[in-house]
Amino acid sequence: MESFEQLAEQYQPMIHKIINSLHIYKNKNEFYQNGLIALWEASKRFNPEKGSFAGYAYSYMKGYMMTEIKKSVKETERCVCPKEEFWEQIEDPSDVDDRLMLDNDLLQDCSQSLTENQRKWLRYTIHYELTIKEIAQLEHVSLTAVKGWRAGARAKLKR
């Protein structure tokens, strides 16, 4: 194979054609770089016995860029900036403190009929938002024991 610089210059129009055929209009330079990376990988993996390099390079670069498009779409979906209404709904931290005081009073009233372990489960779950596994590790008991505390507490609280 010739040097990669020559190869990149020779296949530059093909990379641009792929970018245009995939309707890429944002981050064109980034996708051009991805095309160069794919071209380099294609040159390393190419087997001359299986056909022409041009066809192989085209399909390899197009597939590579389509994969990158999928990745960028997923990333964009994951990193959504909330609309202005979201920021208006964020509550005042002082309101949270008042609500916690109310929750504490309510929990104490409700937990009078619970055993000590059931109260532990309730406190860890509500105040510290711990999972069953974390509670079991903290209290040095089995998962089954904590699940039993939970089942008993739920049954009593439903009554």
Image (spheres, rainbow, N blue to C red):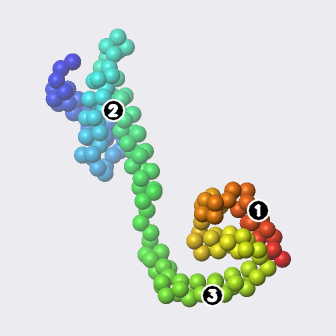
Front label number (3 vs 1): 1
- Image position, residue 34 (x, y; %): 29, 39
The three-letter amino acid code for the residue at tag 1 is Gly
As rendered, which of 42 and 103 lies closer to the eye? Answer: 103
- Image position, residue 122 (x, y; %): 68, 72
Residue projecting furthest to the right = 159
Disc on the earlier residue, 3 or 1? 3
Q: Which residue is mark 2?
A: 61
Q: Mark 3 and mark 1: span between their CA atoms?
A: 27 Å
Disc on the earlier residue, 3 or 2? 2
Q: Which residue is mark 3?
A: 102
As rendered, which of 117 and 123 lies closer to the eye? Answer: 117
- Image position, residue 141 (x, y; %): 67, 59
Q: Secondary structure at mark 3?
A: helix
As rendered, which of 104 and 158 lies closer to the eye? Answer: 104
Q: Secondary structure at mark 2?
A: helix
